[in-house]
Amino acid sequence: MSDPQQTSLRLGIAGLGTVGAGVIKIVRQKANVLAQRSGRKVEIVAVSARNRDKDRGVALSDYAWEDDPVALATRDDVDVFVELMGGSDGPAKAATEAALKAGKDVVTANKAMLAHHGQELAELAEANGAVLRFEAAVAGGIPIIKSLTEGLAGNDIERIMGVMNGTCNYILTRMEDAGLSYEDAFAEADGLGYLEADPNLDVGGIDAGHKLSLLSSIAFGTQVNFDGVELEGIGCVTIEDITQAADMGYRIKLLGVTRLTGRGLEQTMTPCLVPATSPLGQLQGGTNMVVVEGDQVGQVVLRGAGAGEGPTASAVMGDVMDIARGLRMSTFGQPATSLVAAKPAKATVAAPYYLRMSLEDKPGAMAKVAAALGEAGVSIDRMRQYSHDDATAPVLIVTHKTTRAALDDALGALPETGVVSGAPVALRIEEV
Amino acid sequence: MSDPQQTSLRLGIAGLGTVGAGVIKIVRQKANVLAQRSGRKVEIVAVSARNRDKDRGVALSDYAWEDDPVALATRDDVDVFVELMGGSDGPAKAATEAALKAGKDVVTANKAMLAHHGQELAELAEANGAVLRFEAAVAGGIPIIKSLTEGLAGNDIERIMGVMNGTCNYILTRMEDAGLSYEDAFAEADGLGYLEADPNLDVGGIDAGHKLSLLSSIAFGTQVNFDGVELEGIGCVTIEDITQAADMGYRIKLLGVTRLTGRGLEQTMTPCLVPATSPLGQLQGGTNMVVVEGDQVGQVVLRGAGAGEGPTASAVMGDVMDIARGLRMSTFGQPATSLVAAKPAKATVAAPYYLRMSLEDKPGAMAKVAAALGEAGVSIDRMRQYSHDDATAPVLIVTHKTTRAALDDALGALPETGVVSGAPVALRIEEV
């Protein structure tokens, strides 16, 4: 069906890194199957990048060249502007806005731009009768945006959990598998080219937080609110935490969780413990996973490559093919003007927590910690103290279910005990 | 976007079992969110079932009643005929055909009907400008049809694997976990109401084979060919097989595999060994999983509930919402008239096999078996013979990679050795 116009769909691609090159390869190599599936020819008419002379392994001579992505985005012969430059502002945003204002559809892989400007760009698209699609921005090749927006449209979404930064998962996996320190695993990932130019985008949870904020918008009909994501990177995780977690049947993941409760929109992207036998716990290496929980469907798990040329280009082409087929969806699953501003809320759902702290070697030290926790209403499920040969002893505690507020009270009271050295580490144990 | 007509979308539902009741509950309880997401009201105008008086836990008094599903399907006030009766022919097919001929869209959960008549029904839909959608027919709540047809449309699909019959997976899981015989696990599943009226639909692999044949059509642009699915049920699997497989690091699953090779369309739905640590191997109980391998995206895994009121109704509503939003797709991802008839082929990809046979207690018996395998070109990776106290000894063999043809030659030659008692069991070890 799909109401195919008999004209071809003409793409202008800005940004010719690995993903851009991957998209060009697909359009060139699969011309016949794409036309068969969509009912019309999909072709590239023009491209733009910072450096015209770089060898990208694909021939560009068939395409018009534009130095300026804004000029590319507004060319008369471009139907769809494919934005693969990246960056939350600057040329990516300028060209996206120009394309939408000219009534052209936009396909982007740019999570930062949408996390910061998703609402205004979605409104701009609608005002101009254009679509703005971003499957490639979240979890690489996994068709999570489509599944959530369309396939699960009959559900009230109760929770989404995601491991959506492959670099972090690679580092955590290598720490466990090879017994590396965080620093050594980080250095290894860096040597393999896995880290962004600003590594804090990865290990600080920012990149994954961008993605989570986009999923929240679709799931709950709320305006994208990246500033409302509680972010904590994986830099606090030690090899001891990983070993101890494994001993107790858990693995540590940089886990995004989003829920809409009566108190507001709870979005966290923090290191968490998850059962080692769960799908999330079994996710090793650079792979991504998103777990969607709907009131009707129950738990649906999607797993796949979260980055890389082929997977990301696959997601871009999914959006392009939708447009070619005449499948036109709102950016976040409903009219942008109907998305509501959700109040960010601290996570209120009670959970057990894993705590690690250093106790000074004084009589009654453990009792004082237990008392401080107890006074804040935090009760202890399990506690382990390890042998030691310096002045402080590592102590691990797993609490019973408690709220983050009570836990923060307890953590705030610990310095007053005079027996805790340094800042404790507290990681939520997420029931999955 | 989605070109919403401002009129409501009017459903006529035939078949009011658990899924039909689930759909009615969603449409009633989520009226606002469905309208917000689709831009128009979704409502039920008429229903049909065999027994009008049965209590289904949902109020039907608001809807017109039709005894005849064909009459329901062709009512002037029905926009979408929702077929939840089941059965490959009979009323389901008659009403679906009547709806399509009347230009009405059809949403169905009926895998048997589509496995047998998918091509003609898809052509009928197209000839009448209607869409025919079937997300609920494959793997319950998992949005696999949408993911494969739309999200992964930029890929050449290389292989699809699926565990798509929850009852079989439940039986196999219970055999392993509780040490039950096949017969006892079957009886337990039966007692829990997990089995179809004709249990062979489940344990014979027919139901899962239906689903596999639909995935093949989308993946490869071929006409549905259920008769080309090589079917083998789980009745041959013994507790010993499960124990031995586990010992070697495998689990046994009723696994569907489909590939298009130069020799033809290879579709198998057979018990296979998969690595216990793989996502498929870790799938326990009644859950479903589909693994899609695309040339661009690599391996994407989708997991979720394969049956039940909520999950199946969720899938039905995904299709209904697409129609409400104006997202109109070809049934199998491209015009039905462009789907090609694919020649069914025996699986040609070489794989290791697990063999179990009973050897008679004669001198040189093992040597004779090894010789018979070797003459057929099948080489042995591992072999175990177990102690025994009767006249035959259980022997387990894992072969090196071999073709099914060579294996069949070897199996054909075994009786001539005079030392093998009964028919050997041969299960493929699928690399996942």
Image: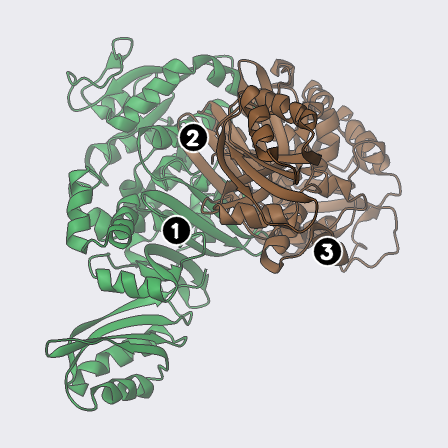
Chain colours: A brown, B green
Question: How far apart are the alpha carbons under marks 3 and 2?
Answer: 49 Å
Of A411 and B57, the residue lying toward us: A411
Tell me the residue that label 1 is attached to: B162
Where on the picture, by quarter, is residue B62?
top left
Vertical position of residue A160 compared to residue A252: above or below:
above
Q: What residue is shown at x 21% (from left), y 18% (from top)?
A: B66
Amino acid type of the residue that numbered disc 1 sits on in the rendered structure: Gly
Of A414 and A290, the residue lying toward us: A414
Asked if the residues shown at circle 3 and circle 1 are in contact, with their CB atoms under 8 angstroms apart, the answer is no
Question: How far apart are the alpha carbons under marks 3 and 1?
Answer: 39 Å
Q: Which mark is residue B319?
A: 2
**Mark before the other along the chain sequence, 1 or 2:** 1
Q: Quadrant of the N terminus of chain B?
A: top right
Q: What residue is shown at x 33% (from left), y 53% (from top)?
A: B225
Image location (x, y in percent) of residue B147: 50, 41
Q: Can you see residue A427?
A: no
Q: What residue is shown at x 44% (from left), y 24% (from top)?
A: A154
Which label lies toward us, 3 or 1? 3
Lateral position of residue A392 relative to residue A146, left or right:
right
Q: What SS does tag 2 mark?
A: helix
Lateral position of residue A253 relative to residue A21, left or right:
left
- Say yes or no: labels 1 and 2 on the same chain: yes
Image location (x, y in percent) of residue B303: 43, 43
Q: Can you see residue A318?
A: yes
- Say yes or no: labels 3 and 1 on the same chain: no
Q: What SS does tag 3 mark?
A: helix
Of B23 and B41, the residue lying toward us: B23
Tell me the residue that label 3 is attached to: A184
